[in-house]
Image: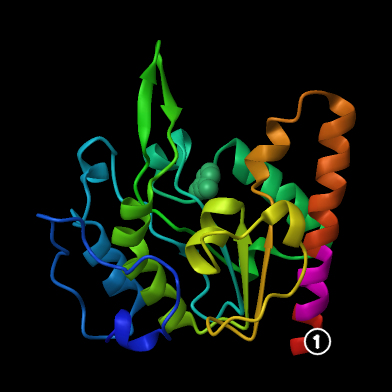
């Protein structure tokens, strides 16, 4: 199955492809999400695999109509091998529930599938993936989108929105709005749930959570329209 350049219209997004001197593992010829997950486990298309515990591929129903795309796995996800199972995942779960979206009916993944981190005392501190790491990982996200053919894609935060929509996309300005895109009939972006955890005080955290739930209610409305 082709999940790469041929499927995508020209855009101003960085070309998907491995970093110089790097290669993808052998790619499946089938549309089996499990086969693509297994292949991604051996990805060395950039250097992030050297420090990460494992590839964290997306997870959810093969029939999911909605894909949520985050940035990259965090510390907990890196260890568990599953996306959004740490603190940001708990915020996402809470907001999905408040918006009336059942997490078991959606597919959750990331723009980058290895945890990028630096040492900070005894902890591993999150580092933002760069453009070439995002471009190297794009093949896997394209495969997930091509196989699931979602009706709705939700970008969680600037990294996902800039990877999928436009390098200059501003989540603060465009959040919650439907954005025309060849990727799916309905595409929108909202904040990353970890930004809510970083809010400076309880009042702003509550306000940010309310706004996040409002954006997800817009997603729920789109989903209801599909039924
Ligand atoms: N943040 C993300 O963007 N993705 C995860 O899976 C966890 C935290």
The residue carrying mark 1 is 225
Magenta region, residue range: 217-222
Q: Is mark 1 within 8 Å of ligand 1?
A: no
- Quadrant showing the C terminus: bottom right
Locate residue 196 relative to residue 54 in the image: left or right. right
Residue 123 lies in quadrant = top left
Which residue is depicted at the point 56% across and 81% down?
A: 150
Which residue is depicted at the point 51% across and 67% down?
A: 164
User: In the figure, 49 relative to 167: above or below?
Assistant: above
Residue 115 x/y as whole percent: 37, 41
- Quadrant showing the N terminus: bottom left
- Mark 1 Cα-neighbour bin, 10 Å: few <14, some 14–19, many ≥20: few
Q: Which SS type dominates the magenta stretch?
A: helix
Disc 1 is placed on an element classified as helix
Q: Nearer the viewer, residue 126 or 89?
A: 126
Residue 158 colored magenta?
no
Locate residue 159 relative to residue 32 in the image: left or right. right
């Amino acid at each position: 199955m082709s999940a790469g350049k041929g499927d995508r219209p020209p855009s101003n997004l960085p070309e998907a492809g491995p970093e110089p001197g790097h290669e993808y593992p052998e790619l499946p010829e089938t549309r089996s999400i499990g086969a693509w997950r297994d292949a991604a486990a051996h990805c060395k298309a950039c250097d992030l695999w050297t420090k990460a515990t494992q590839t964290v591929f997306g997870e959810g129903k093969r029939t999911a109509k909605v894909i949520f795309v985050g940035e990259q796995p965090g510390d907990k996800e890196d260890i568990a091998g599953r996306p959004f199972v740490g603190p940001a995942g708990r915020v996402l779960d809470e907001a999905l529930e408040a918006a009336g979206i059942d997490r078991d009916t959606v597919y959750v993944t990331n723009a980058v599938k290895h945890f990028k981190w630096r040492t900070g005392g005894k902890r591993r501190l999150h580092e933002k993936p760069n453009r070439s790491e995002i471009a190297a990982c794009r093949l896997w996200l394209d495969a997930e989108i091509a196989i699931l053919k979602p009706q709705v894609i939700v970008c969680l935060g600037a990294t996902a929105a800039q990877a999928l929509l436009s390098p200059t996309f501003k989540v603060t300005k465009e959040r919650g709005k439907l954005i025309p895109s060849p990727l799916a009939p309905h595409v929108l972006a909202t904040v990353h749930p970890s930004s809510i955890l970083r809010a400076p005080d309880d009042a702003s955290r509550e306000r940010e959570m309310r706004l996040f739930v409002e954006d997800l209610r817009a997603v729920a409305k789109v989903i209801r329209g599909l039924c």
